[in-house]
Image: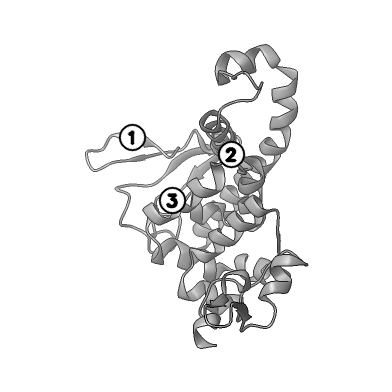
Amino acid sequence: LEDALRRDFTINSLFYNIRTGKVEDWTGRGLTDLMETRLIVTPVDPHETFHDDPLRVLRAIRFCVRLDFTLHNDIVQAAMSKRVHHSLHVKVSRERVGKELEGMLTGKHARPGCALDMIAELHLAGSVFAFPGSFPGDTGHVFGPVTGHILGVDYHGCCGKDGPEAVALAATHRARGWDESSALLALLPKVMESHVAEREMFLGEGNNGSPSVMDSRLLHICAFILPFHNLTFPDAKGRECSVT
């Protein structure tokens, strides 16, 4: 039972007993969640599950999108908590985050637009696509402030040194940017349909009339981070680098 409760989700806490030839469901709901309700649910309180390994919140999105499941409301509430966002940023390496994101955006059953939109809806975009200095005390990845503008409004990143008001203002500007990202994703299918010739030219469509997995993924990511393309920060040599 303890082993089952330590798993990320109930659908992954099922065990096959080789002696009896039966599936054992120690959480009491794994089979139901898998075969009937098609829900992504944690065996224990999702805050506890995500605190143990914050990457699990992204795994929940990946399973939901690729398997066409639904996130349990408790997971939604936990995923939107600032504690989980901060833990994902400080406890999980960028490499692990990138690998999980890759799993959402590529593959036979990938739905890049749906995955990115869910990341935005759960307010996780700022943790997944973290700006240098975007979290309090985060000074290890930047040698100066992130500056520029978001949606025509001047932006000055905190770099972990600004006061509470400046930090809150920067966070508000970023949140507006991510809202715009969601709006751009919603428009993307209509734009692609209305520009068939350009789509064929730039996406290199194959015989089946659809863009390659790589092109589709890049197109969605480019649209998603577009609101932030005017932000820069200095590197170790003082050269301005684009956030995107």
At x 72%, y 38%, the residue is 186
- Identify whether 194 is placed above or below 159: above
Give the residue number, with chain letter if any, for mark 1: 240
**Residue at image coords 40%, 67%:** 91
| Residue with the most extreme left position | 237
> Residue 142: horizontal and vertical position, in percent?
32, 49
Of circles 2 and 3, which is in front?
A: 3
Badge number at residue 203: none
Q: Which residue is mark 2?
A: 224
- State which tag comes first along the sequence, 2 or 3: 3
Q: Residue at x 48, y 63 (%)?
A: 55
Discs 2, 3 touching: Cβ within 8 Å: no
For residue 234, what is the image quadrant? Answer: top left
Image depth: mark 1 or mark 2 in front: 2
Residue 232 left/right relative to 168:
left
Asked if residue 123 can be seen in this view, the reply is: no
* Residue type, numbered disc 1: Glu
Q: Is residue 101 above or below residue 136?
A: above
In this view, the residue farthest toward the bottom is 1
Alpha carbon of mark 1 to alpha carbon of mark 2: how far? Answer: 22 Å
Which one is in front, 148 or 2? 2
Reading the chain from its start, which is encountered first: label 1 or label 3?
A: 3
Image quadrant holding the N terminus, namely: bottom right
Q: Which label sits in the foreground, 1 or 3? A: 3
The picture places residue 58, in percent across and down from the top left corner, at: 54, 59
Q: CA distance from mark 2 to mark 3?
A: 18 Å
In this figure, which residue is indicated by the disc labeled 3?
A: 99
